[in-house]
Amino acid sequence: MATKQSTIDFLLDQLARLDGVSARKMFGEFAIYVDGKIVGLVCDDSLFLKPTAEVRLYLGENCAEEPPYPSAKPHLVVDEERWEDDEWMCELFRVAAAALPLPVKKGAAPKKAATEKTATAKSATKRPAKEVAPTQAGAPHPYQDDPTPAQLKRTLTACPAPLRELYLGLHALVVEVLPDVKYSLDLKDGMLGYGAHQYGANGWGVAALAFYSKWVSLGFLQGAALPDPKSLLEGSGKSLRHVKIRSAEELKKHSAAICALVKAASKANR
């Protein structure tokens, strides 16, 4: 399963306090850069860093080492549970970047001066430039407005069954609180955006629902400004906050507080 855009959005938000961090698509997955250096890869929603001695020391003796994709060299795996600690993550990436050399800029080789004869010959035989079709690299993910339950279940086939029930339960809560809300399903990564189409962290208005390997997350773009008396919201970026639900018991326990957050987010989005 390819990495979801929501995973990249979350990682970048956690690393927001570290200067020079960016992500770029690479062969269907993502590379994470710090100051122009490729520090690691995100493949199948897992984070892999280059296996330097400094990163190995920072992660500890028991850090796992796996290839991020078939035929790749082993990289160090960053446990998903550690992603929540933004200070720890920023320091990890600072250490990882400092251990790598600066990228070498490839300069163009100096051209030999052409004689009048060769220049004329080249000019005469030069072929017209091929017209290149525009790429679709920046195209938004395909989406479905107000998906039916059957469409939701089809898109969630990659989601483990227990998490699928949590996802659908959280969705039902949002729709119960906001019966007229417009929502859109990302058909590629299964994220639901409420209040607007969801194409990354700046695409949705009220909230966004996504599943990960061990939990389901309901994210609020302006979560830092929402009242949270039950302290459910996690994250410490500039504005994004999210509620993580790992079990049916947690969903039942926190349903009232989640409904209050959804109401507050809807009011803030008007």
Image (tube, helix red, strand yellow):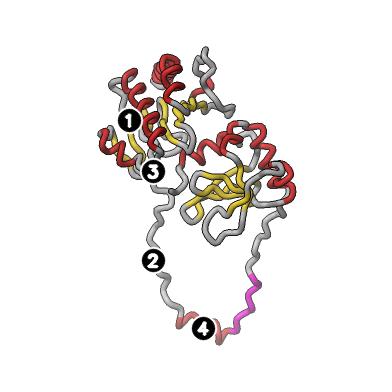
| Between 64 and 137, the one nearer to me in the picture | 64
| Between 132 and 50, the one nearer to me in the picture | 50
Mark 1 vs mark 3: in front: 3
* Marks 4 and 1, the one that precedes in the sequence: 4
Q: Are marks 4 and 1 in contact (CB under 8 Å)?
A: no
Q: Using the rendered view, name the quadrant where residue 185 is placed.
A: top left
* Marks 1 and 2, the one that precedes in the sequence: 2
Q: The residue under label 2 is which amino acid type?
A: Glu
The residue that label 4 is drawn on is: 120
- Of all residues shown, which one is farthest toward the top? 229
Residue 152 part of the magenta segment: no
Q: Which residues are magenta?
A: 109-115
Q: Which mark is residue 131?
A: 2
Mark 4 vs mark 1: in front: 1
- Residue 115, relative to residue 211: is it above or below? below
**Residue 191 visible, this angle:** yes
* Marks 1 and 3, the one that precedes in the sequence: 3
